[in-house]
Amino acid sequence: MTVRIGTSGWAYPEWRDTYYPAGLPRTRELDYVGGRMATVELNGSFYSLQRPSSYRAWRDRTPESFVFAVKGHRFVTHLRRLREPCVSVANFLASGVLELGDKLGPVLWQFPERLRFDPGLLADFLAALPHDSHAALRLVTDHATLLPAQPSSVRGPLVPMRHAVEVRHPTFLSARFVDLLRTHGVALVAADTAGRWPYVEETTTDFTYVRLHGATELYASSYDSAALERWAAKIRTWCGTGDVYVYFDNTAKAAAPHDAERLAALLGRVVAGPSRRQSSAS
């Protein structure tokens, strides 16, 4: 199985001269990350719809084996709060997500802190999520109401699509919720949040998605060697059930890229780098 370890985003002022080499142009930061990590989580897509040209540029600037996780737009999760999912998910996909091609990794749907578990609402949302690029295009064609100035023209080979859900309200600590995820083949994010929100480990599909937001201080504190050893042990166990994606979100003080590289070094040869197309065919 494949383990990919990276960071949530890459364009942070705090990383300049502490992780990036002095004088590295900002336009080359993704290139630098792509040469040192196997994946990165696109989090700008949460705050605003991106352009197809941006997704194409990110795809073309990274190595062939690189994979992007893409954070779903907050209009779907925080504004519409999962209501009318076909339209809102279609509009998000229409912004150009599929331009990543076989570099498209899991799509992350982060639920707001005050969103409570509603079985009917969640079932409708999960049922709307496409699980391959052709199904995504059909959803866009049938339901999208917002199209970018440069509409996506992707009509290529079928690419699998994976989805992961990160929850923050305790009402989701429910066997019924876990069963719904298993029924729809969606992963439950194991999110370490310095104790701020519930932590859950449940394998609900053929991959595991991990977000590490900070050991003791949310979005900021680093993970010491003992903590990284514990995460490495968990990852070795999760490898037995499928692929593993790990993203460090402790970005505020530049800990994330250093922690990602240290964890990858601990795992050694189990951190593999085949493309999604290659790994899905094996």
Image (tube, grey):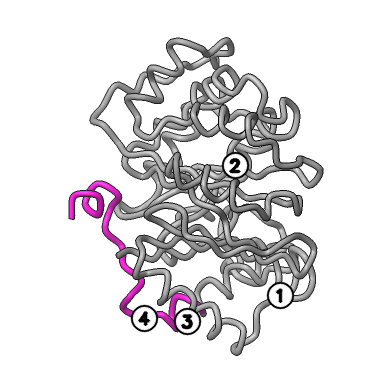
> Of label 4 and label 1, which has the lower sequence position?
1
Q: Is residue 276 magenta?
A: yes
| Between discs 2 and 3, the one toward the N terminus | 2
Q: Residue at x 52, y 47 (%)?
A: 179
Helix, strand or loop status at disc 3: helix
Helix, strand or loop at label 2? It is strand
Label of residue 109 in the image = 2
Specify start and end residues of the magenta stretch as a single range. 263-282
**Do residues under tags 4 and 1 come within 8 Å of each other at their CB atoms?**
no
Amino acid type, label 1? Ala
Specify which label sits upstream in the sequence, 1 or 2: 2
Q: Is 186 situated above or below 199?
A: above
* Tag 3 near tag 1, CB within 8 Å: no
What number is the disc on residue 233? 3
Disc 4 to disc 3: CB gap under 8 Å:
no
Residue at the (46%, 54%) spot, across then down: 204
Q: Is residue 130 visible?
A: yes
- Quadrant (top left/top right/bottom left/bottom right) for the N terminus: bottom left
244 is higher (above) or lower (below) than 147 = below
Q: What amino acid type should be assigned to the residue bearing mark 4?
A: Gly
> Which amino acid does the dot numbered 3 rest on?
Ala
